[in-house]
């Protein structure tokens, strides 16, 4: 697996590559390739130090990866489903037995605390478990005697070469959501992860090969926009799965669908948590802290807007503020740390800029994370709480993707629902209440893809599918679970008849029963 090397402090603006720093390579056709004309730097967000250099793929390197996937496609498609399932079972064993090794890589490059990294791996493994049942998921349908002597059956077949483009915030979970289903369905894959924290993905690809996956079925390239555009534009790539920001998701969807490709592109989020007057406010405050500041808010399902209904806002805010004071912020490997840094210095500057602009927009800074007692090194942003936030303010309209909780007060249930339904994002939402009727009405009326009732982060379990609405998803198919098998396969309908020799005759009419 990838070797961890000592940190080396360098200038963040320095674009040169130190040959002594570990290089994270591509993996094409089962072989590592570290040569490149261009490299990116991989930081430890908790220290601000460079820990590795990642090779960026040229167009020729991407072409080689696609060629390897295309060459492997016929053999993998012909592989029996039981043998494919065996790879999933072995992969499950490898990941679960060595999850702490993978978690350490995630924490070093992404910054989240180790317990959160372990949780991410567990949610990714859920989809490995689901895909181990591929013999069931790949079943078709059969209808006997649709007409006299005529049988009809529908079968699932893989698309061929598919691309998976994954984000920095879940460097293990999201790849395991995508590539496991694509491979289980009989496709071959070109995987392009975030260049910010690439080592976890290399670990996973190596684990796949250790589990018995043939060379060329899963190919890994690192890079930037050039690599992504090369993947999308190549006619051999039949489908693209993407998770990232809304502007990029929309751009990828537009570009790839114009070329006739199948696309699922998951974008940004602005997840609201409605707190009704009858709710348990202590439970709601705990949930707001957990869902708002876990992983430093760098989750597409993080709660970013609290919507207290009626006259409970002041009491709820006081409870949240008290709990925030007890949070321990620090390096993810430290056992006492509850929240780590954000991914880059640029992310830190952007988040703090939105915090600074909140007051000038008319909002009230209840807890200003910029003045928090934080580690001197690294890309830390203090937990922030902002009251009286409303649509039209950048802190409300933009996806912050950091440890910032906004409070948008509502006078009634209907006002809260209207606020959420008018938001351009519709990934996840939640309601906290003891009233079953209010909960049911919320489920019915809300225009959001994933809904929690007294559950702040309603990420579906592996046997369901994950996906939002509006500008949180471009495409018709959600990620992982049953819908993902639909995305990575196409249906073929076969109509058959075996007539006796004397039954054949000419009939120019339209076939009927």
Image (spheres, grey):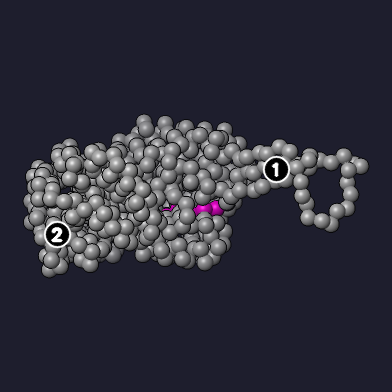
Give 271 or 343, whichever is nearer the viewer: 271
- Residue 463 appears in view: yes
Which residue does the numbered mark 2 point to in the structure image?
388
Task: Tell me if residue 162 is in the magenta stretch.
Answer: yes
Structural distance between the alpha carbons of marks 1 and 2: 61 Å
Residue located at (68% from left, 39% from top):
143
Residue interval drawn in magenta: 160-165
Q: Is residue 168 left or right of residue 292?
A: right
Q: Quadrant of residue 394?
A: bottom left
Mark 1 or mark 2: which comes first in sequence?
Answer: 1
Q: Is residue 253 left or right of residue 426?
A: right
Circle on res. 152: 1
Prevailing secondary structure of the magenta residues:
strand
Residue located at (23% from left, 64% from top):
391
Residue 325, percent from left and from top: 8, 45
Residue 158, percent from left and from top: 58, 47
């Amino acid at each position: 697996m990838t070797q961890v090397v000592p940190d080396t402090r360098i200038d963040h603006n320095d674009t040169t590559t130190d040959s002594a720093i570990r290089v994270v390579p591509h993996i094409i056709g089962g072989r590592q390739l570290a040569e490149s004309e261009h490299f990116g730097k991989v930081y430890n967000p908790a220290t601000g130090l460079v820990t590795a250099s990642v090779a960026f793929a040229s167009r020729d390197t991407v072409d080689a990866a696609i060629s390897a996937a295309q060459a492997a496609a016929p053999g993998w498609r012909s592989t029996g489903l039981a043998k494919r399932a065996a790879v999933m079972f072995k992969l499950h064993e490898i990941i679960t037995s060595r999850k702490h090794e993978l978690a350490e890589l995630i924490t070093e490059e992404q910054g989240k605390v180790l317990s959160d990294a372990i949780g991410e791996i567990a949610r990714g493994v859920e989809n490995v478990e689901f895909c181990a049942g591929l013999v069931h998921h790949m079943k078709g349908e059969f209808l006997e005697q649709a007409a006299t002597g005529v049988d009809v059956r529908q079968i699932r077949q893989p698309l061929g070469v598919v691309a998976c483009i994954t984000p920095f915030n879940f460097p293990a979970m999201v790849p395991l959501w995508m590539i496991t289903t694509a491979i289980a369905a009989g496709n071959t894959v070109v995987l392009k992860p975030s260049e910010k924290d690439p080592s976890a993905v290399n670990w996973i690809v190596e684990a796949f090969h250790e589990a018995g996956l043939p060379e060329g079925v899963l190919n890994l390239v690192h890079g930037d926009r050039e690599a992504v555009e090369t993947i999308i534009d190549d006619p051999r790539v039949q489908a693209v799965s993407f998770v990232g920001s809304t502007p990029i998701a929309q751009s990828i969807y537009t570009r790839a669908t114009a070329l006739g490709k199948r696309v699922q592109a998951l974008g940004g989020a602005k997840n609201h948590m409605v707190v009704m007057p009858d709710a348990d406010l202590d439970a709601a405050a705990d949930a707001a802290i957990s869902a708002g500041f876990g992983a430093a808010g760098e989750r597409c399902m993080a709660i970013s807007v609290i919507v207290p209904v009626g006259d409970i806002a002041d009491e709820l805010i006081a409870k949240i503020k008290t709990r925030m004071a007890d949070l321990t912020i620090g390096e993810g490997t430290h056992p006492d740390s509850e929240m780590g840094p954000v991914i880059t210095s640029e992310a830190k500057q952007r988040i703090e800029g939105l915090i600074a602009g909140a007051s000038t927009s008319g909002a009230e800074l209840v807890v200003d994370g910029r003045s928090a007692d934080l580690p001197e090194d690294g890309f830390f942003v203090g937990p922030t709480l902002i009251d009286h936030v409303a649509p039209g303010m950048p802190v409300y309209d933009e996806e912050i993707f950091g440890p910032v909780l906004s409070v948008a007060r509502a006078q009634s249930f209907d006002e809260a629902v209207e606020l959420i339904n008018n938001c351009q994002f519709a990934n996840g939402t939640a309601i906290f209440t003891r009233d079953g009727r209010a909960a049911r009405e919320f489920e019915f009326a809300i225009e959001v893809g994933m809904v929690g009732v007294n559950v702040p982060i309603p990420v579906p379990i592996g046997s369901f599918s994950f996906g939002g609405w509006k500008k949180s998803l471009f495409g018709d198919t959600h990620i992982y679970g049953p819908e993902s098998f639909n995305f990575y396969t196409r249906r073929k309908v076969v109509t058959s008849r075996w007539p006796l020799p004397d039954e054949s005759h000419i009939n120019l009419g339209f076939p009927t029963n």
